[in-house]
Image (cartoon, grey):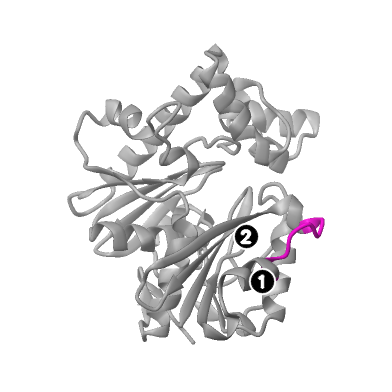
Amino acid sequence: MAFIGMDHGTTGISFCIMSDEGEVIDVFKIGREESKKGLVSATEELTKRVDLNEVKLMAVTYAMGDGINQILPVSQVKDRGILSINGAGKVTGGGTSVFDELEQLNLPLIMIPGLHKDSTSLDRLFRAAYSHQASPEKVSISYNAIKETGWSNFIVADISSNSVDILIEDGKIKGAIDACLGAMGIVHGPLDLEMLRDIDENGASANGCFSHAGAIKIADIDGKVANMKDELLKNYREGDEKAKLAIDTLIMTVAMEIAGLDVVCGNPIEGIVLTGSVGSAAEPFNFKDEIDKYFKGKYELKVISKESGAIGAAQIAMDVYGGRKEILGIEVNI
């Protein structure tokens, strides 16, 4: 018996294969570009690692997840659970090709929703304030965070190509701050006044601005999304002042966002969970140590796997198969 989780990430699609005892058997990633070009097959990669006849349930995430607000069988979800692909970051088609492959496998599939204005599980003030708060893998990341810490009141900081911070209160997701609203990630970030003027006056696209509003904007880096983080960290290691300023600024914006979520939590915060390729980084800078310079030891900081999205999705699959009717306040309807 096995369970699979899929994280539809910015730079690639990650999978976690988990035993029925909750042990992680394998985690692997498929690049978006490679998938789109047919250079790699999700089906082939899965069958190398697990007997598909042994898979009892697979939980998947896809894009914004704003077309659904419950955990549902994929067979009951229209349009892959999204309202639109426009304005959602760089579109390559790699994630879509993987999704199409999975549908052809005849595996039992469930889909995790994103967090948005129609998510009845969220605090009504967050729903009123923001049309979109987080994509579906932030739900699975948060679930893995609960499993790893045992906390009920905490903030998850997922820092990678984009930065999204999620507030969990009494074991349920209360709300979140999406990448286009608050903290910078490596690639994506908030649309500030200069960008809004560029859109109005020069015809720049909002999507294009969003995809260049992260730390790369400060470091003056452009190119393929999959390569930007490596280039930024390379420059940082080599002592480039722009790269250092970019990383330092990113960390500051994340600290501000975490502090803001703490203010609106009705219970004392037990700690902060750090994840993502940057949030879990120990070199060339230690993200945990650097952000704690702002918090001055106020919070317990715990780093979990940068693959927490895929791992958490597998954990959701296992617990839904076991009969759970809600995940982090989100209704399970299968």
- For residue 253, say whether it is visible: yes
Residue 78 place in picture, x, y as percent: 67, 77
The residue type indicated by label 1 comes to: Arg
* Circles 1, 2 touching at the beta carbon (< 8 Å): yes
Query: Alpha-carbon neighbours of circle 1 within 10 Å: few (<14), some, or many (≥20)?
Result: many
Name which quarter of the figure residue 193 lies in. top right
Query: Alpha-carbon neighbours of circle 2 within 10 Å: few (<14), some, or many (≥20)?
Result: many
Q: In the image shown, does 60 or 152 lie closer to the viewer?
A: 60
The residue where tag 1 is placed is 80
Q: Is residue 138 left or right of residue 174?
A: right
Name which quarter of the figure residue 35 lies in. bottom right
Residue drawn at x 69%, y 60% is: 95
Residue drawn at x 59%, y 81% is: 52
Count of labels in the image: 2
Label whose residue precedes the other's in the sequence (1 or 2) = 2
How far is mark 1 from mark 2, CA to CA? Answer: 9 Å
- For residue 182, say whether it is visible: no
Residue 31 place in picture, x, y as percent: 68, 52
Q: Is residue 304 left or right of residue 97?
A: left
Residue drawn at x 71%, y 47% is: 90
The region drawn magenta spans: 36-43
Name which quarter of the figure residue 13 lies in. bottom right
The residue type indicated by label 2 comes to: Ala
Tag shown at residue 277: none
Residue 18 place in picture, x, y as percent: 44, 71
The residue where tag 2 is placed is 63
* Callout 1 secondary element: helix
